[in-house]
Amino acid sequence: MEKRKKDKIINIILIVVLLGVVVYTAKTLLKIYVFISFKVPTESMAPIVNPGNRVMVNRLAYGRRIFATSLDSIKHGDITRNSGYSQPKRNDIMVFNNPYCWGWHLLHFDKLQYFVKRCMALPGDTFEIKKGHYHVRGFDGDLGNVEAQDLVEYLTKDSATIADNNVPFGAFPLREEIPWNIREFGPLYMPKAGDTLQLNEFTWLIYGHIIEWEIGKTIEPRDGKFYVDGDVEITQHIMDQGLYFMCGDNCINSIDSRAWGLVPEEFIVGRVEWVY
């Protein structure tokens, strides 16, 4: 009887240990392959996501990213993506790597720099802001936080309200030639994979830094023409991937695509499923 009792205790311990290993392994695999959690430090997505909240991001919805090299030296082409079971949609809340952590006109991939924003426009969309409100041509639904956009409608460059918030009145690309602002912006086309962009003064100011990222070379504008490697003229570029327009719900306190431009598809981590 004593031996049976000891064997029963040992079996119970083994089962508990085994269950613990299974749970830990499952949790680790879920974190690696399915979900990843981020803590949000800012109020750019308030009131949906507030400072200190954590977001659980689904990495499989759009397809899990696969990195071909060290995350410390990522270049365009080093990132591929498995097939997902869902397509990105307007109004999805997404987490993505900050493409402009080295400056608003230079793309760079940093594994430690993340943003959480809402997707306003998809590849193939034409996006614009009229009286502070977001619109996609051919789409009749609401985009983002309409009540917050109501506040932007009455802002001006000299408005005292601007001084109380962290968003500049001027907007991407911050050039006199294209005097857009957060009240009146666009229309701006979101290229999709396979689109051919003709290089001219407008497309250079809007898409130039993304084209440089895709070809891995610096483009020099000179006398109305564009050159790579000093003397090789480039007149057009076929897009490798689609571009997205991302905005925070807290329109008067969010630095987003209105300030720094478009987000390439390969920078997107996944879709936010839960806020806690």
Image (cartoon, grey):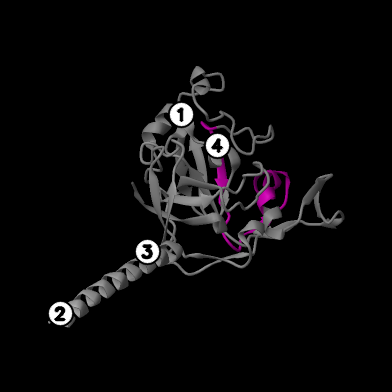
Q: Are marks 3 and 2 in contact (CB under 8 Å)?
A: no
- Point out the image quarter for the N terminus: bottom left
- How far apart marks 1 and 3 lie (CA) works out to 43 Å
Q: Mark 2 points at which residue?
A: 2
Q: Name the residue under label 3.
A: 27
Q: Name the residue under label 4.
A: 185
Residue type at numbered disc 2: Glu
Q: How many marks?
A: 4
Camera-near label (1 vs 4) is 1
**Residue furthest left as drawn:** 1
**Image location (x, y in percent) of residue 192:** 56, 58
Q: In this view, does 38 lie to the left or right of 181?
A: left
- Secondary structure of residue under mark 3: helix
- How far apart marks 3 and 2 lie (CA) works out to 38 Å
Camera-near label (3 vs 2) is 2
Q: Nearer the viewer, residue 188 or 75?
A: 75
